[in-house]
Amino acid sequence: MSDQRQILVDVTCDHPTPGTEAQLDWVGMESVEMPILWSQGPGQPEYLLPAQVDVYVSLDKAKAKGIHMSRLYSLLKESLPRQTLTAKGFKGLTRALVESQEGLSRSSRLKVSFLLPLEREALLSGLKGWRQYPVSFEGRWQGDHWQQRLKFEVLYSSTCPCSAALSQQAMQQHFLARFGSSQMVSLSEVAQWLGEEGSLAATAHAQRSRAQVELALSRELEWTTVMRHWIDVTEKALATPVQAAVKRQDEQEFARLNAANLMFCEDAARRLHQTFSAQADVLEHHIKVEHLESLHPHNAVAEKQS
């Protein structure tokens, strides 16, 4: 029996671009819905996480009409949901994207974005709860040069130094209004007054804040451990990361940490810049912090790039 399959036309190869000819830096797809196979570390279970993928290759042949885009999707589908995401595997996939184009491309870019679930412990009680951190891995293959970048987001609390100073001043005035006419005031009287309803004259305003950190690394570190490490480094530098499950002692400690770490957005950006400038494995870093103001309807923003 003769083969009845029809050979379909390939516009990319059979129909060169008429007239305008030019190389293109990047051609590909963005926000591809694709699960990834993830593990929190050696010996830990593997599970699928929903992700979004941006994938590109260069179009280096000026006369070619386009790239083989379906081949990019096929490579993603055969790799990301089936092989645990690692730095080594990601590098190999990025190179395979170039090879799939059969001479049309010399460079590729691949970015995978997802929410990383991490179990976090409360400040004092030992109670544990789950947080989800927006993270992304990006790799670039250009000739024989490979570069990887990590990006993640951390939420923290920022108490305004100006508001804290004004609140302190209001408390001083409130105290003088209550005890200013007294010749002698005992410690017990002051302590009792401080615990009474209405003794608090003002409180400093704080807001949920966001730090976006992008790192270019000097060597191929394993992501399953390094991403958690950099998140921990960031939260330690800021000192006031938002909490998951808490008890009252944790909430009180959180309030104490906020008072001990008053921050404008400039302060937070400088803290992180200093922290990542001292990291030997970090070639470059880009810091952006946003304080989602509770006083104003707009945000305060600061950025620093090494």
Image (cartoon, rainbow, N blue to C red):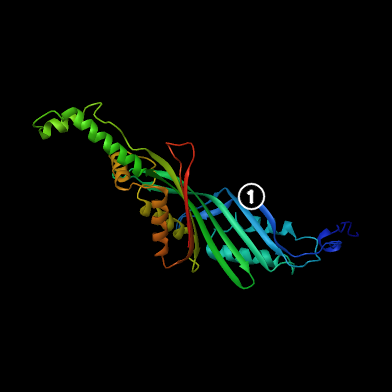
Residue found at the far bottom of this picture: 144
**Residue 104 placement, left or right of 94:** right
Nearest the viewer among 296 and 284 is 296
Residue at the image point whose x is 38% and y is 44% from the top: 158
User: Residue 65's spot in the image, x, y percent?
Assistant: 80, 61
Residue found at the far top of this picture: 197
Determine whether 108 is above or below 185 in the image.
below
User: Residue 24's spot in the image, x, y percent?
Assistant: 73, 62
**Residue 225 placement, left or right of 25:** left
**Residue 81 placement, left or right of 295:** right
Would residue 42 be seen by someone viewing this image from the given angle?
no
Nearest the viewer among 211 and 14 is 211
Residue at the image point whose x is 65% and y is 50% from the top: 32
Q: Assess disc 1: are there few (<14), some (14-19) or many (≥20) residues with their C-alpha within 10 Å of its C-alpha.
A: few
Nearest the viewer among 50 and 235 is 235
Would residue 165 be seen by someone viewing this image from the given angle?
yes
Amino acid type indicated by mark 1 = Ser
User: Residue 85's spot in the image, x, y percent?
Assistant: 54, 58
Quarter residue 27 falls in: bottom right
**Residue 24 placement, left or right of 87:** right
Residue at the image point whose x is 11% and y is 29% from the top: 182
- Locate the N terminus and report the quarter of the image it occupies: bottom right
Q: Which residue is mark 1?
A: 31
User: Residue 111's spot in the image, x, y percent?
Assistant: 59, 57
Which element type, helix, strand or loop, lies under badge 1?
A: strand
Quarter residue 90 falls in: bottom right
Residue found at the far left of this picture: 184
